[in-house]
């Protein structure tokens, strides 16, 4: 066997034997994140609310505002990957739902940020989330605090 | 020809064996930090001789960083709280993440023993981040109704494993759902 062929063969085997690092890059399964809850957090800190909402009306609807008595400020935020590979958050933009369309606020994606918390949120507590829609009007979600 | 085979064989053995490639040797580094109880910690010196599973977070990020923290907690739980593995979460927001803020954050995640949060002087914290190749950059700023300033941070999404000589031997996307399983499998290969 010529040395060149031997070297190439060994290098190919070497590459094929490397550990499967690509398995580390598996993406988040959004279906597994579909739990309705608010994350535990301390007073003054930041938490997030996750839930699903469906527009059951026969006309489009727009989410106008979100509030919670436990938070100094509540906003729709979105986690995203920046162009240079970092993770960040940005305002989620306007939420418009077509008839029968639903939206999932979930970990790692679009979520309700609860900032400047007025009290500790511990497991077992319940948090009131107030949503104002242009057509459906006011709606309240009571979510359990769960890590 | 025989010499060539002899020279290449160890290379092949290493690639196919259980010895992972060293990504970064932090053994010569030393960072003076504080843990969640305000006790001085020298990293990585105080952890040498043990494996370390380490993530990078800031507590005002309840979404991606909570996934990273959740993964660290899950790995520790899945491994039945191993005594030879330390779990560390270091903040890249030392201005807000004081020891008491980190302690409160840890309580929300029910962290167990052998779980250390690290913060400290900004210079030391960011030197650690540089060494661990963790990037962070203040992005969005906002003000609450009561006039409180808020800011958010774009950051690397990372969990890494250090061996007993403080060498980084594995790195992962820290918030990914599959990480607890993968880290456990990798640790079991080298422990």
Image (cartoon, coloured by chain):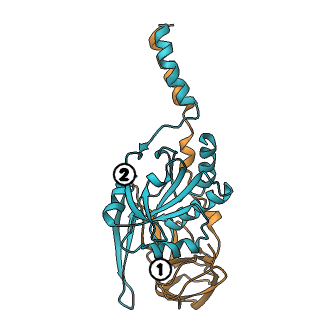
Chain colours: A orange, B cyan
Mark 1, other Cα within 10 Å: few <14 / some 14–19 / many ≥20: many
Residue B142 location (% of width, % of height): 36, 80
Q: Residue at x 56, y 37 (%)?
A: A19
Judging from the image, what secondary structure is the residue with disc 2 in? helix
Q: Are marks 1 and 2 in contact (CB under 8 Å)?
A: no
- Kindly report the distance in space between the C-alpha atoms of the residues bearing marks 1 and 2: 28 Å
Q: Quadrant of residue B155?
A: bottom left
Between residue B33 and residue A27, name the one nearer to us. Answer: B33
Above or below residue B145? Residue A5 is above
Chain assignment, label 2: B
Residue occupied by mark 1: A45
Chain assignment, label 1: A
Q: Quadrant of the C terminus of chain B?
A: top right
Above or below residue A123? Residue B106 is above
Q: Quadrant of residue B124?
A: bottom left
Q: Residue at x 38, y 69 (%)?
A: B94
Judging from the image, what secondary structure is the residue with disc 1 in? loop
Q: Residue at x 39, y 90 (%)?
A: B145
Residue occupied by mark 2: B131
Disc tally is 2
Q: Are marks 1 and 2 on the same chain?
A: no
Q: Residue at x 59, y 70 (%)?
A: B109
């Amino acid at each position: 066997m010529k040395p060149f062929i031997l070297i190439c063969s060994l290098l190919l085997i070497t590459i094929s034997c490397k550990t499967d690092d690509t398995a580390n890059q598996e993406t988040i399964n959004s279906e597994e994140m579909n739990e309705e809850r608010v994350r535990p957090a301390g007073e003054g800190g930041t938490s997030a609310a996750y839930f699903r909402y469906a527009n059951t009306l026969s006309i489009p609807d727009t989410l106008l505002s979100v509030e919670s008595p436990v938070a100094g400020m509540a906003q729709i935020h979105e986690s995203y990957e920046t162009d240079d590979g970092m993770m960040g958050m940005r305002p989620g933009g306007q939420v418009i739902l077509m008839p029968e369309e639903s939206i999932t606020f979930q970990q790692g994606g679009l979520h309700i940020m609860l900032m400047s918390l007025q009290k500790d949120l511990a497991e077992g507590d319940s948090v009131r989330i107030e949503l104002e829609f242009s057509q459906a009007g006011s709606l309240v979600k009571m979510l359990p605090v769960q890590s | 020809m025989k010499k060539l085979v002899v020279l290449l064989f160890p290379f092949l053995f290493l690639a196919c064996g259980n010895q992972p490639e060293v990504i970064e040797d932090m053994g010569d580094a030393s960072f003076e930090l504080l843990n969640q109880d305000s006790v001085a910690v020298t990293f990585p010196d105080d952890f040498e001789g043990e494996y370390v599973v380490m993530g990078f977070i800031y507590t005002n990020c309840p979404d991606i960083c909570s996934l990273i923290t959740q993964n660290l907690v899950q790995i520790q739980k899945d491994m039945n709280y191993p005594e030879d593995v330390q779990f560390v979460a270091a903040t890249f927001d030392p201005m807000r993440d004081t020891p008491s803020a980190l302690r409160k954050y840890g309580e929300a995640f029910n962290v167990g023993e052998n779980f250390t949060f690290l913060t400290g002087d900004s210079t030391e914290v960011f030197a650690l981040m540089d060494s661990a190749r963790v990037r962070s950059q203040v992005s969005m700023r906002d003000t609450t109704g009561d006039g409180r300033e808020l800011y958010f941070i774009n950051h690397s999404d990372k969990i890494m494993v250090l061996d007993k000589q403080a060498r980084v031997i594995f790195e992962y996307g820290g918030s990914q759902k599959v990480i607890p399983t993968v880290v456990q499998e990798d640790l079991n290969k080298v422990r």
